[in-house]
Image: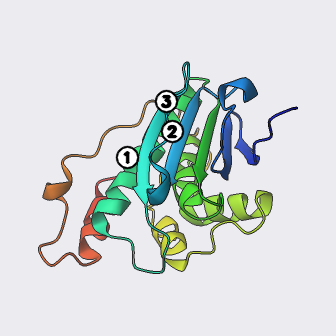
Amino acid sequence: MALMIDATRLWSKLYQGSYPLEGVRAHGFRVLVLCAEELQHRVEEPGVVTLHCPLFDDGRPMSPIEWHRAVRTGREVAAHVAAGHRTLVTCAQGRNRSGLVAGIALYELTGRSGEQCVQHIRALRRGALTNDDFVAALYGLPPRIRQGAHPVRRAPQRIGPVHERLSADGTDQGRQTLLRHL
C-alpha cells in the first residue's frame, strides 16, 4: 500500500501540506516543518531535518513572538530550499500556518512582495491563507528588491533576540519593529 502525503508544490523544492502521518523521507523530502502548535510531538525521522514553528490558528491575533518565530522559520526554510533540499511546510490542514511560513520563504527566495506571495499560494493551494491576521502580516512585508534585480538566493540573516524587538505593551508595534529589521 502506497503512502500518500497531501502536499502542493509552491516553488522548486518548496511544498505546503497538511500534517503527514509518516513517509516524509520516502517521498523525497529532506526537511519537514511543523507549524501547528498542537502537532509538535512528531518523532524524528532518520534523514529528515525537522523544524518546529508552533503557531496558533484559533482566531486570536498573532503575537509578536509568534511573528518572530514564523519569520525565523521562513528564513530557515528559504535557506534549505536554496541549498536544494526538498522541503515540506505543514500544519494541521495545510492552509494557514503552513501558508504563513511558506509565504515568508517565498518572499525570501523570490523577492516578490508579500501580497504576490499570498496570491501565488492561494492560486496553487485551494483554501490556503484564509486567516486575515496572517495575510495582513504577509502583506505588511517591506519591498525587498528593485524591479529587474535578481531574487535573494543567499542564506537568510538571523533576526536579533526577540526581546529587543517587542514593544512593552505587547501590541502590534513589536511586529512593525520586526518588519523594519527584515
For residue 146, say whether it is visible. no
N-terminal label among 3 and 1: 3
Q: Identify the residue position indicated by label 3 in the image.
A: 44
Q: Residue at x 45, y 48 (%)?
A: 40
N-terminal label among 3 and 2: 3
147 vs 175, left or right, is: right
From the viewer's side, name the closer residue of 181 and 132.
132
Q: Identify the residue position indicated by label 2 in the image.
A: 77
Place of residue 172 in the rendered image (x, y in percent of width and height, measured from the top left):
29, 76
Q: Residue at x 45, y 62 (%)?
A: 141
* Residue at the outermost right position: 1
Place of residue 166 in the rendered image (x, y in percent of width and height, measured from the top left):
19, 65
Place of residue 33 in the rendered image (x, y in percent of width and height, measured from the top left):
52, 42
Near mark 3 (Cα within 10 A), the count class, few <14, some 14-19 or many ≥20, is few
In this rendering, the label closer to the viewer, 3 or 2 = 3
Q: Identify the residue position indicated by label 1 in the image.
A: 72
Residue 177 vertical position relative to residue 11 in the rendered view, above or below: below
The amino acid pointed to by label 3 is Glu
N-terminal label among 2 and 1: 1
Q: Residue at x 30, y 40 (%)?
A: 158
* Residue at the outermost top position: 47
Task: Residue 134: give its label.
Answer: none
Near mark 1 (Cα within 10 A), the count class, few <14, some 14-19 or many ≥20, is many
The amino acid pointed to by label 2 is Val
